[in-house]
Image: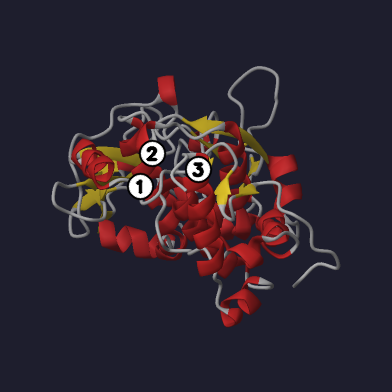
Amino acid sequence: MPGPERHNNPYLRHGGALEGDAPGEGGGAREELARREAGSGLEVEIVDRSRGARSGPVAPVRLTFSDRFGFSCHKGISCWNACCRDTDITLTPFDILKLSRTLDLRPAEFLRRFAVSAIWERADLPVAKLRVADEEGGHKPCVFLDDEEGCTVYDDRPVACRYYPLGLAAVKLKGHETPEDFYFLVEEDHCRGHAEPKQQSVAEFRAEQGVEPYDLQNRGWIEILMKMTSWKTLGGPNGKAPGERTKQMFFMATTDVDAFRRFVFETSFLESYDVDPALAGRLGSDDEALMRFAFDWLKHILFNEAAVALRRDVLQRAVARARRDMGAG
């Protein structure tokens, strides 16, 4: 989907790195080892829609697929809709795609009407959060809540709502390359669902709530949040926290596929990166493929990973320029 006019990409410097935020060449083996050590045993809650001061305790037990728990939510329960008020829901990239489609909106318009930007503190990266309605008095309801019928976007509700009353967390174990997921139970004071007789395993609950496609599509985003959280303990990748321009690009790439598509096709991006022509063709129309590609590109920008590679000639010119800048050439 090339645009009618190609122009220089203001976010690309030296053929790929974000201006002002270029990672060190190669990332540094010692720095990466230090990050892995700092990240060992690190637990990061990824999906948790509990509500701060009104929340009850999180059950201090890691749950696996086979673990069972008692819970049921239905229209006849006394706390019906209570969990849809005063919520703090981080929208994942796939949430935004799904909700935009069900509302017949493009992501930028969806974000303008139904979301607010915030910083995900553990990783110091921007995310979108679901708005609550601005009502006087009482507890502020979700923008998609109908008092009688409940959730008006239930079939495409955010993954945090699907998981409730479970939370999803990831832990980086020493010696493991990738984080491992685990689950925990959120027991809020208002919720009567825990007293219901229905018993199910975590696996059964996940299948019933349809969370698997969300976890698969969001996997790259979760990995970035996890890795940035471990890097933050060392001051950021290569000791440097991401700058404002990098944060802006992260937010754009993870919330607005249309803006990222323009970034790829209407700037010098494809002249800088080695993107297979068949993949480039898919990226022009396949939002999910473009979203996953955005995660890979962000891993390259933030951590110097090779998931998306610079063209060889671009890389050679960048290395030569860097050497000249350091007086080595």
Tell which circle, 3 or 2, labels the residue nearer the N-terminal end. Answer: 3
Q: Which of marks 2 and 1 is in front?
A: 1
Instruction: Locate residue 200 relative to residue 4 in the image: left or right.
Output: left
The numbered mark at residue 22 is 3
Q: Mark 1 points at which residue?
A: 27
Residue 89 % position (x, y): 51, 38
Packing grade of label 2 (10 A; few <14, some 14-19, many >=20) is many
Element under disc 1: loop
Q: Residue furthest top?
A: 137
Residue 107 % position (x, y): 70, 53
Q: In which quarter of the image is residue 212?
A: bottom left
Residues at discs 2 and 1 in contact (Cβ within 8 Å): yes
Residue 307 % position (x, y): 43, 63
Q: Is residue 128 visible?
A: no
Q: What separation in Å lies between label 3 and label 2 (alpha carbons)? A: 10 Å
The foreground one among 315 and 154 is: 315
Give the residue drawn at x 20%, y 48%: 63
Give the residue drawn at x 49%, y 57%: 295
Residues at discs 1 and 3 in contact (Cβ within 8 Å): no
Instruction: Locate residue 240 relative to residue 248 in the image: left or right.
Output: left
The foreground one among 213 and 138 is: 213
Amino acid marked by disc 2:
Pro
Amino acid marked by disc 3:
Ala
Give the residue drawn at x 53%, y 54%: 318
The numbered mark at residue 237 is 2
Q: In which quarter of the image is residue 53?
A: top left
Q: Which corner quadrant holds the N terminus?
A: bottom right
Give the residue drawn at x 52%, y 41%: 325
